Amino acid sequence: MDNKLLTVRDLAERWQKTELTIRRYVADGILTPCKGVPGTMFAPSYIAKLEGVELERVSPLEKRRLETERDMYKKKYEDMKAIITNVLIEVSKVIKIPKENELDNINVWR
């Protein structure tokens, strides 16, 4: 979408309204023009939000690349989780953890 600010005339043509109607919307507080610019102008992103148009922050190709990268990291996470689980299982077989009642029989002062 073009980042050029929209004039009252541009918006009137876009919405198929008169310029007077657009100015009335501004006066009634329905529309908020940009501040710090000469005249009454509107940001295209603001108008798109009012129209209910979803604006994509990234291009479709970039979005696809990010989704692929996310899926790759999800798989790596699951693989690492499985490896850690297997390591913990094997370590627990090697290290015998005494049960609570067996702690009394351990002589640490030998």
Image (spheres, rainbow, N blue to C red):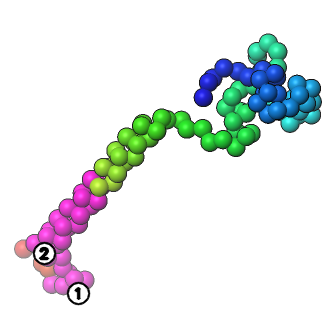
The residue shown at (70%, 21%) is: 5
In the image, the segment drawn in magenta is 76-105
Name the residue type under label 1. Asn
Residue in front for this viewpoint, 107 or 64: 64
User: Which image quadrant for residue 6?
Assistant: top right
Q: Which mark is residue 101?
A: 1
Q: CA distance from mark 2 to mark 1?
A: 20 Å
Counting from the top left corner in percent of width and height, residue 18 is at 89, 28
Q: Secondary structure beneath disc 1?
A: helix
Q: Main secondary structure of the magenta part?
A: helix
Q: Secondary structure beneath disc 2?
A: helix
Residue in front for this viewpoint, 9 or 69: 9
Of tags 2 and 1, the one toward the viewer is 2
User: Hey, which residue is sitting farthest left in the picture?
Assistant: 110
Question: Magenta stretch: residue 16 in it?
Answer: no
User: Hey, which residue is sitting farthest top in the picture?
Assistant: 38
If the image is split into quadrants, where does the N terminus sit? top right
Q: Which mark is residue 15?
A: none
Residue in front for this viewpoint, 62 or 110: 62
The residue shown at (76%, 16%) is: 36
Q: Which residue is mark 2?
A: 93
The residue shown at (34%, 51%) is: 71
